Image (spheres, coloured by chain):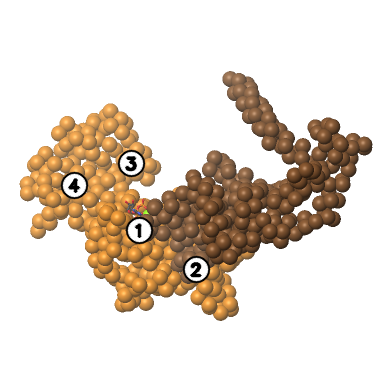
Chain colours: A brown, B orange
Amino acid sequence: MHLDKKFSHIGRSIFIHTFLICFTILALFPMVIVIINSFKTRKGIFREPLSFPTAETFSIKGYETVITGGDFQLYFTNSFIVTSVSLFFILLFGAMASYALSEYRFKGNLFMGLFLAFGIMIPIRLGTVAILKLMVATGLVNTLTALILVYIAQGLPLCIFILTEFMKTVSDDLKNAGRIDGLSEYRILFTLVIPLIRPAMATVAVFSMIPIWNDLWFPLILASGEEVKTITLGAQNFIGQYLTNWNAVLAALSLAILPVVILYLIFSRQLIRGITSGAVK
Amino acid sequence: MGTLKLKNISKSFGNVEVLRDISLEVADGEFVIFVGPSGCGKSTLLRIIAGLEDATKGEVIIDGQMVNHLGAADRGISMVFQSYALYPHMTVEANMGLGLKQAKTPKAEIKARVTKAANMLELTPLLNRRPAELSGGQRQRVAIGRSIVREPKIFLFDEPLSNLDAALRVNTRIEIANLHNSLNSSMIYVTHDQVEAMTLADKIVVLHDGKIEQIGHPIELYNHPCNMFVAGFIGSPKMNFFDADKLDVKNAITVGVRPEHIKIDAKQGDYECEITYVEHLGSDSNLYLTHPKLGAFTVRVFGQVAYARGETLHASLLKESMHKFDEHENVITDI
Ligand SMILES: Nc1ncnc2c1ncn2[C@@H]1O[C@H](COP(=O)(O)OP(=O)(O)OP(=O)(O)O)[C@@H](O)[C@H]1O
Ligand SMILES: [Mg+2]
């Protein structure tokens, strides 16, 4: 009986792992192709797109083009500014709104929560035309501010939805103890509540960060000027109507993956705890 | 000084009325305990006194001053919570000193007060640890220490011992009693536990469904409960209730007799009963009996007994210890 159980346990874990490995391969495949091809000559890319670079086809010309020629560093900085500033404000405003929704009883609390979470179901791109008009009217077109504002709006609903649920789990006694000790509501939020829901914050950070970093739509529409291009848009420079510099495009994309991966690694320890926190106690 | 007066406090959550017209006075230095079944509003009342919750109606008066509009930090109270509620990212010392730091007390004085409280509760070796590195009992002592450091007019405790194991509970209970003796401050304490209520309190407030049923000294509540609810709630095992006419008692609807006020004998007595269950507690024993006319009831006898389930036993109710109740379940005092 004992053996049986053990066997079925092993069987299950083989099944789960096979599934996860397949999924990982599927998800990583395009990225790996991009990265290995970014290290090949143009000929190498087209003759054998799936093979690793050999002595003959190896080339870092793409990276040279990207790093030396053009405004790659500027694009990179732009992307970085947009993503980090948006992320900061999403988490800040999201945490404050969730705290209010989870902590205070007021008229319209439920309605407010639904209203704020509504954006999860309605893609913000539906409002592109209106947003563009608004940005033109306020003179924000072709600024990073325009992108940051839009991304904050895009990120908040999911953030509020997730954080509200997590904040409800923070013990009332702890918050009350803080109140009796004379902490302001802000201090209670920032020093007592947020440290306790760090895993949830990390989860939200990752889920909000990736779409912002990868977005092509809003940079194209709201900020296509040379000075304010983000990296995903900047990489398009190398795609021409008649001639595409594939080495450069692939190199630019490979480099663009890096910061996301780094940030992900920073958050991931917290992230795993966040995802499993309900299940494993 | 630390007097408290509650005037006609009511509290509703939406349409649900949780507290109804609570009026109460706590004298300086008094140890008052709120007891009552789960959900009767004990914690809510305590939170209203603390200023963590607003009363729908009524006034909270501390030291003669109306404090309804004051925040929790400005009422001169401190509170110990059931779940300890220590700040997880701070050391024991910082936990205890935070309230004073917020109130901009000079550093030297904070240090002095924390040291004094730590000595009192034997927390000195633990001052640099974080809550995660403490045992449950130590955490609760830190929580108590945190409230001592504030030197409040009134201490509030919400079931402070219910997360501790039995042995620790007894120790901490004695510690709280000593604390009350040495500090001489007013304390308000919520508990489920009969023993805590009876041993610690100067005054017990029995709450039921958001109303005060009776206020009094523990022994007074035990000897003279004013209605069937209090009679059944105070004392363990629970008081036995019989229909008055089955006992041939006149001018009453129900008669209550405490399990310790029933005499048993193997040979003779008023009622011949069958034993359905025996609980041996060592120092005393609880016998569960049934009688064809009276139904089931409980008897508590001192020491150990040799009776077993299924045996027959004679029980006699002590006439002078009977409590009589009328049709509204209120006690009848016949003089
Ligand atoms: N924030 C709230 N919103 C709505 N109802 C509440 C709220 N807090 C408490 N109640 C209700 O008020 C009633 C009294 O709650 P309270 O916590 O004071 O009970 P209690 O006597 O402390 O019970 P226990 O002994 O289980 O701690 C309960 O019926 C509870 O459901
Ligand atoms: Mg309670």
Q: Secondary structure at mark 3?
A: strand
Q: Position of residue B234 (x, y in %)?
A: 28, 52
Which residue type does callout 4 highlight? Answer: Gly
Q: Residue placed at 26% from the left, 41% from the top?
A: B299
Measure the C-alpha gap from mark 3 to mark 1.
56 Å
Q: Are marks 4 and 1 on the same chain?
A: no
Q: Can you identify the residue that label 1 sits on?
A: A107
Q: Can you identify the residue that label 4 sits on?
A: B256
Q: Residue placed at 53% from the left, 58% from the top?
A: A133
Measure the C-alpha gap from mark 1 to mark 2.
25 Å
**Disc 4 versus disc 2: nearer the observer:** 2
**Disc 4 versus disc 3: nearer the observer:** 4
Picture layout, residue B194 above or below residue B290 = below
Left or right: residue A54 compared with residue B309: right
Left or right: residue A11 compared with residue B152: right
Q: Earlier in the sequence, mark 1 or mark 2?
A: 1
How crowded pointer 2 is (Cα within 10 Å; few <14, some 14-19, many 20+) is rated as many
